[in-house]
């Protein structure tokens, strides 16, 4: 057994007890599924809508840009909003905003109309991840947070999986507009369940004293109020900014353009596109949970918290590299395997990157830090979407350069995280470094 200075001595003293914290993760999984279902539907329907409205790849890149800028604003502002009003109200408000905007997509008939709808969607959807990460930090001890994050974050992959299934069935029956009506309405039902079922763990009637003791069984970073404007002074914020700024643009490319890539390279229609996308997102689900489990397992094996997280990041980064070959292969299922592996690795990477924020920041500032970092990375993702659109128009849908860029981004991000973080989490316990 490795001896580490940042693995709390109380870790073995309190055994897991109760299960309501996993009910909360279940609720977060469902809303994250809805979030990505609403977000990904436009990308899945893009070939169909593009045929009706005749917009170019550059036009589509501009639509993604509009969403990205709004998402950046929503990510930063909704994270701070949640830190002020609390998890229960913060997530409910965000969900209602984006679900209304998702429904409105079915009412627009122009590039400008889609841009406006995406702006409102982005403002609301920006609240999902800051609030979910804050929830995990509130409900789980340190050693379980990456796994819990991986589980709820798997909802993003399920949302990507469900979107093409809904798109294919509903579009074939009632038209593409109806697909937006269906997906947009589901979130309002979730909000009703969330408001009834969520309370803070120390005030929840379903949380036993034993489960509360387990949740609080490990020392955390000192609870210290941090004004939103001072978040950039902390390592946790910069770790997330760097990691997400380098990798989120790649993730957004996958979600917005992979359906079009498969459509243009392998000439499949909307119905035939469904199964490859389902396989990709099933693989991504496995990566999300496995990446979160890996660092938790390393911690239990005796590795320090930061060492475990960085080893998990490195393993995931290595799995993204082969995706550069996707535009070069001649079989659709080989491309699906390469893309699925890269997207699975992204989600494992993301689970650990998110968790590093709660590892390094007081719980009271987690949503704000994730929101600020995510907002900055979303701005960069928006500009990258514009570049992707121009590159594809200029090269007549040649995706080679874009996949090459995505193949190396995670390795660079892992190196950056390694340089920013201190060697031991113990250096941060009791005071924010």
Image (cartoon, helix red, strand yellow):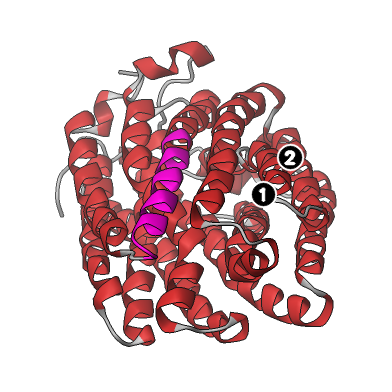
- As drawn, 368 above or below 146: above
Question: Residue 372, how many percent across, how many down?
Answer: 48, 27
The furthest residue to the left: 2
Residue 171: quarter of image: bottom right
Of tags 1 and 2, the one toward the viewer is: 1
Q: Residues within 10 Å of mark 1 (few under 14, many from 20)?
A: some
Expressed as whole percent of the image width and height from the top left, the position of residue 330 reads: 29, 85
Disc 2 marks which residue?
A: 199
Q: Name above or below for residue 209 compared with residue 241.
A: below
Return the disc, 1 or 2, that comes first in the chain's sequence.
1
Residue drawn 20% across the image and 61% down it: 318
The residue positioned 48% from the left and 38% from the top of the image is 378
Dividing the image into 4 quarters, which one contains the N terminus? bottom left
The one of 187 and 179 positioned closer to us in this rendering: 179
Residue 384 pos. (x, y %): 40, 43
Q: What residue do we see at 29% from left, 61% from top? A: 403
Q: What segment is highlighted magenta in the picture?
A: 379-397
- Is residue 426 within the magenta segment? no
Vertical placement of residue 244 versus 61, above or below: above
Q: Residues within 10 Å of mark 2 (few under 14, many from 20)?
A: some
**Can residue 225 be seen in the rendering of this structure?**
no
Disc number placed over residue 111 in the picture, else none = 1
Q: Nearer the viewer, residue 20 or 230?
A: 230
In percent of width and height, residue 105 lies at: 76, 54
């Amino acid at each position: 057994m490795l001896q580490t200075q940042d693995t709390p001595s109380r870790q073995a003293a309190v055994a897991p007890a109760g299960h309501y914290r996993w009910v909360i993760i279940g609720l977060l999984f469902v809303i994250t599924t809805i979030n990505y279902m609403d977000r990904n539907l436009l990308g899945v329907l893009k070939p169909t809508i593009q045929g009706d409205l005749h917009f170019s790849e550059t036009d589509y890149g501009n639509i993604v840009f509009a969403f990205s800028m709004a998402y950046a604003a929503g990510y930063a502002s909704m994270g701070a909003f949640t830190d002020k009003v609390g998890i229960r109200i913060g997530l409910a408000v965000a969900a209602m905003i984006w679900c209304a905007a998702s429904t409105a997509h079915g009412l627009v008939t122009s590039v400008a109309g889609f841009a406006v709808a995406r702006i409102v969607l982005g403002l609301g959807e920006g609240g999902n991840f800051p609030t979910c990460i804050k929830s995990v930090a509130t409900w789980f001890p340190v050693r379980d947070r990456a796994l819990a994050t991986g589980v709820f974050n798997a909802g993003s992959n399920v949302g990507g999986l469900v979107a093409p299934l809904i798109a294919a069935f509903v579009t074939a029956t009632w038209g593409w507009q109806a697909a937006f009506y269906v997906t947009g309405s589901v979130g309002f039902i979730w909000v009703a369940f969330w408001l009834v079922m969520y309370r803070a763990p120390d005030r929840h009637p379903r949380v036993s004293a034993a489960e509360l003791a387990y949740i609080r069984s490990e020392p955390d970073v000192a609870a210290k109020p941090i004004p939103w404007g001072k978040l950039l002074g902390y390592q946790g914020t910069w770790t997330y900014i760097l990691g997400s700024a380098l990798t989120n643009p790649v993730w957004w490319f996958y979600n917005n353009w992979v359906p079009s890539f498969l459509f243009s390279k392998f000439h499949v229609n909307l119905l035939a596109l469904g199964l490859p996308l389902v396989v990709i997102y099933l693989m991504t689900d496995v990566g999300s949970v496995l990446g979160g489990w890996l660092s938790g397992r390393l911690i239990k094996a005796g590795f320090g918290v930061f060492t475990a997280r960085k080893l998990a990041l490195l393993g995931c980064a290595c799995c993204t590299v082969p995706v550069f070959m996707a535009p070069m292969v001649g079989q659709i299922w080989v491309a699906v395997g390469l893309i699925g592996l890269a997207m699975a690795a992204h989600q494992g990477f993301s689970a650990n990157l998110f968790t590093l924020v709660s590892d390094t920041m007081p719980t009271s500032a987690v949503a704000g830090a994730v929101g600020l970092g995510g907002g900055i990375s979303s701005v960069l993702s928006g500009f990258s979407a514009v570049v992707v659109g121009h590159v594809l128009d200029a090269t007549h849908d040649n995706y080679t350069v874009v996949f090459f860029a995505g193949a190396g981004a995670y390795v660079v991000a892992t190196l950056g995280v390694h340089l920013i973080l201190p060697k031991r989490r113990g250096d941060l316990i009791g005071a924010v470094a």
